[in-house]
Image (tube, rainbow, N blue to C red):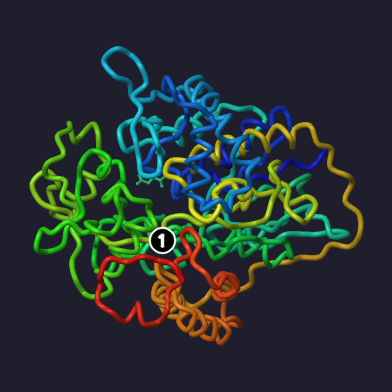
Amino acid sequence: MNAPIVVVGAGVAGLATALAAAPARVLLLSRGEAGAGSASLLAQGGLAAALATGDSAAAHAHDTMVAGAHHNDVACVQWLCAQAPGVVEWLLAQGVAFDRAGDGQLLLGREGGHGVARIVHAGGDATGAVITRALAARVGAAHHIHWHSGVEVDALCLRDNRVCGLRLRRADGSLEELAASAVVLATGGSGALFARTSNPPGADGAGLALALAAGARVRDLEFVQFHPTALDVPGQQSLPLVTEALRGAGARLVDAQGRRLLDGVHPLRDLAPRDVVARQVWLERQAGARVLLDATAVDVDWPHAFPNVLAACLAHGIDPRTTPIPVTPAAHYQMGGIAVDADGRSSLPGLYAVGEVAGTGVHGANRLASNSLLEGIAFGRRLGGWLAAAAAPPATGAPEWRGLGAGLPPPRLAQLRELLWQVAGPLRSRSGLRRGLDGCIDWSGEGWQARLALAMLAAALRRPDSLGAHGCVPDTVLATSPAPLAVAC
Ligand code: SIN
């Protein structure tokens, strides 16, 4: 019997890939059960698709390119936006109940960067959870997929420079070697390498680091998107997101005196592009000031429209219906990743990547809101279909293991996260990036996270000018008070 296709990661990208690979045999590996621990499960934004009368895939593609500062792979963007209405249809067929208006039509919301309302949601701000659970249920019922949770991948096996297996580590520390006809990394992003993130703790970049260790090409690692509004919980690293859709519904960012933060910064004010808003909030917070999202005038049925935001705020003693929400920026999304073509093929034969860990170039230098669930599902289905039809050549040659190696000890990891937050956050300076690089060089023998951070900082230093989410400013700007900021260096 042929070795199975091994898919690593059970967010929407991994689940969609596994489903689409039928009838080929798939082994799905994940750390948590039923998608638990994946960033998909936390996604509050919806899924963008040109469904409205007068909207078009071309208009969606235009907005995606503008958000991405035209650094995008144009063919990938056009393909993705053309697929989006079909993805919504497919999700409906998988049992995803998108939110509808009284007349039964799909409700279409608007978020920053979109020229029209084109975002479908499910369960209000619980779209990621609703989709992930629906796909996980389909995977659970699929005969071609065996799902093994509670494991991590520790190393890849190459023969004649082709990936043909992996080694996994169980929760009890025991190791197991497996043959694979293909290995698909769907391991998500690396937000948890920063001191403040909207990602779950498991979004630590391990898949990206593994691909780097194996010698796969990576791209665009300097582009990290920071979300402007995570709930500011002191001392906590993984922070609840306060969705941008709240600002779409009328919430306003204000300072401690109630002054609007985005006045004079951008004509779209609170709905300015995410990087613009994140930098302004970051400057205020770095200067020690509080930033609040005032949603007290948002007139919606909160438990239905924003159940996650409401629950997270209430859990921290804040009722967002009556009290402005303290917010901070947080590392949110990695635009770059393992360099792959549109079929998910990396530079190493036998190794594929999909979803946030993959660098197709579709998001350019900054991802448009609500394009991430779409990307994971559309490219996952494409990759799964491709793998179902592909025949893996027989594995020959001596096995060569390339692994992550040890992780940083917890105190050093905490130091690394703080360092990245300070030098590679929403605003960067060349001297700060160099300082970060020196720190990571010193720590690179201690753990794989430092080597991954080193690659990210080196990429940021190779790009001297601001582009998209990479906001590079002179040192003097970071030392001054938070005047309205124009990033142009
Ligand atoms: C949000 O809901 O604000 C985030 C959506 C996204 O990242 O696309």
Identified at 81% across, 65% down, the residue is: 400
Position of residue 14 relative to residue 467, above or below, is: above
Residue 410 shows in the view: no
Could you classify mark 1 by the number of other residues whose Cα lies within 10 Å: few (under 14), some (14-19), or many (20 or more)?
Answer: many
Identified at 50% across, 34% down, the residue is: 136
Identified at 46% across, 55% down, the residue is: 333
Residue 177 rendering spot, x and y as whole percentages: 72, 56
Position of residue 74 relative to residue 103, above or below, is: below
Which of the 4 image quadrants contains residue 158?
bottom right
Identified at 40% across, 36% down, the residue is: 115
Q: Which is nearer the eye, 379 or 129? A: 379
Which kind of residue does numbered mark 1 sit on?
Ala
Residue 106 rendering spot, x and y as whole percentages: 37, 21
Residue 364 shows in the view: yes
Residue 176 rendering spot, x and y as whole percentages: 68, 57
Q: Which is nearer the eye, 392 or 458? A: 458
Residue 150 rendering spot, x and y as whole percentages: 53, 51
Q: Say which element carries label 1.
A: strand
Total numbered circles? 1
Q: Which is nearer the eye, 188 or 1? A: 188
Position of residue 158 relative to residue 30, above or below, is: below
Tell me the residue that label 1 is attached to: 331
